Amino acid sequence: MTPSEAQTRIAALRAEVAHHDERYYRKANPEITDPQYDRLKRELGDLEARFPEAAGKAGADTPTAGVGDDRAEGFQTYRHRQAMQSLDNTYSEAELREFHERLVKLLGRESLAYVVEPKVDGLAVSLTYEKGALVRAVTRGNGTEGDDVTANALTIQGLPRVLRASAGAPLPDLIEIRGEIFMALAEFERINAARDAEGEERYANPRNLAAGTIKLLDPREVAARKLEIVLYGIGACEPATSGGETQSGYHARVRAWGLPTVERLWKAQGIDEVWAAIGELDRVRAGFAYGTDGAVVKLDSLALQREAGSTSRAPRWAMAYKFAAERAETRLSRISVQVGRTGVLTPVAELEPVLLAGSTVSRATLHNQDEIARKDIREGDFVYVEKAGEVIPAVVGVNTARRAPQCVPYVFPKSCPACQTAVIQVEGEVALRCPNYDCPVQVRRRVLHFASKACVDIDGMGEAMVDVVVGKGWVKGIADLYRLKREDLLTLGKSVEKSSDNLLLAIERSKKADLWRFIHGLGIAHVGAAAAKDLALRFGSLEALSESRIDAYIGSSKESLIAGIGPTMADAIISHFNQPVNRTLVRDLVGAGVDPAKPAAAAPGTGPLLGKTFVLTGTLPTMTREEASARIEAAGGKISSSVSKKTSFVLAGSDAGSKLEKAKALGVAVIGEQELLAML
Ligand code: IVH
């Protein structure tokens, strides 16, 4: 390779890696697997090292120097006291051994003690505890400053707001504890099963869903998905000694404080023991709650860690060894295009079934037309399919040597495969959409969502029945569900009388479902069940909601007027009802006899918080104090201004003062906004 070729390649790789950093860190929606990404980044790093001059000419900015950037709109940023670094990684045993040799040389000792930890596949977070109380949770961001996601992190079960003091583990004045937020596989499956039932697209993998969830603007939506956390590292610590002297001791300390730590950790003397521990980790990792895509090898002694130091990007005392992805080659027989509820077209690779990491794979998502073009994937190609800590396998490349001459570049359909309407590209989006509101697949998905358990819950109106009633042309939109005729249903078979009557009864019953269920069922972008409940409480009817104006949501100084409904959601609601079809739907539903049950404000002397006394302190993440007090009282609770033994709960926000101390001293339960909302 000549220097000028290197320069061209470096520039291209930088753009490509930067693109994938954006997809992974900011959008939580990567197009390539981790091993593919690592290969690109490795190639870039190697070229930059071999051709420093060409690297300089290719521009100053390189993604190999940083740690990515996850900062997103809608969050306050917060500067870490101690920067959050990344880790060097390798897939090779030889390189792992070189890492050890480097340390031997650098530290001038033959024998080095390590710990081997699972590499947790989630998103990095830094928790700050001051005098034992959780004050902040911040994402890694660009390493120097990240997004303050405290309100969302407070929904994580098993994350103590207050550390437990114990004899062997004194509480520091201030400590940044680092770890990983993740979603357990079981929770991921539960959410995807619900998506299936609603006819919505499945989420790709738990890591991305966890990363997307922590960046939701509504903490209640976060609470509805169970996130978990595991802690493994230390940032700033005052006094410095309170972190302990070794990494393994630090783990013990973190556990003693009541924080969740990695499921297993190996102490290893020298690199051979490290290698054996990695082998054992690989054998047991399938049983862990979180996805584990490798091992992190760290020097055990914190003093030696300090001595080894760091580069600008990563510590010299740690190395991630990543398990190779399982890969298979198979023929891609066809690319099919699926239409989503909102008309988004998603290409799917239909594969000749192949065994991969223990399961048979016959389909893989291709994300969008850009990805197909970039990889030049063609129907009939032999492709590599990879599964790497990912639940959905990905097509990572084409074996062009096996490409048949008749294979032609794939042309994305110009019209919707379901209704043949010309597809459009919405400005600012990669995805193509079918703009036809009456497209039968979109209708099917909308109806399925509306009738699902999460919405008005019409028993018997599952996927198969929706297919029938839409296919027969009886249901062209949601409101038609309420116009289904018994005589039509009776034509569906011989002994369908009973099932038809049951279905009609379920439809009839759904007319009186809770208002929020209807609101959720309308399928307004960004509006989930929790937000639908707030909207129901605020507007009291579908008509009032459909006629709402922006000033009902956002005040003159840009503040949210409805708790939990931020500006993005408000915009989505307004533009939803700006479309005449959506206003017509509301009118049709009401015309068809829909009579939603209004949410009842708790009468005095009743409610879930009856007999409970609350003391408020600090700033709550989304509610004002007045609002929180009003909601507690509406639910039957009482507000008091001082903490005593009779206090049921202290509701604490950030910068909580002496009331929090007193609560701890008296052993009064301390809760956050999320827990209050859960009680309500
Ligand atoms: S230590 C300064 N330990 O992997 C070193 N990181 O690829 C800080 N990760 O940014 C990291 N499990 O988000 C460490 N046991 C573990 C880990 C771990 C997962 C993540 C972390 C880090 C990334 C680097």
Image (tube, helix red, strand yellow):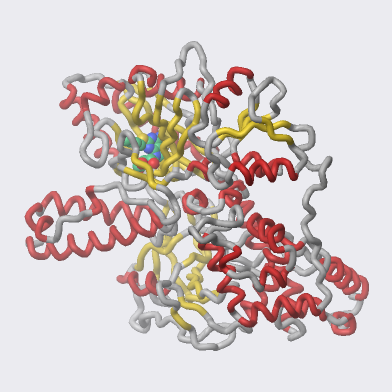
**Most foreground residue, 112 or 680:** 680
Is 12 on the left or on the right of 431, as rendered?
left
* Quarter the N terminus occupies: bottom left
In the rendered image, residue 193, in percent from the top left (x then y), is placed at 64, 57
Q: Residue at x 64, y 39 (%)?
A: 675
Q: Residue at x 74, y 72 (%)?
A: 464
Residue located 63% across and 20% down the image: 667
Nearer to the camera, 563 or 154: 563
Whether residue 116 is situated above or below residue 386 in the rendered picture: above
- Residue 655 seen by the camera: yes
Asked if one can make out residue 360 in the rendered structure from this viewpoint, the answer is: no
Q: Position of residue 463 (x, y in %)?
A: 71, 70
Q: Which residue shows up at 47% across the image and 36% down it?
A: 283
Ligand 1 falls in quadrant: top left
- Relative to 171, does residue 544 appear above or below in the rendering? below
Task: Determine the residue located farthest toward the top in the rendered image.
Answer: 167
Residue 344 percent coordinates (x, y):
52, 74
Quarter containing the C terminus? top right
Q: Quadrant of residue 457?
A: bottom right
Side (left or right) of 625 relative to 91: right
The answer to which image quadrant residue 27 occupies is: bottom left
Q: Nearer the viewer, residue 167 or 602?
A: 602
Give how far across and how far down residue 506 sits, in percent.
85, 67
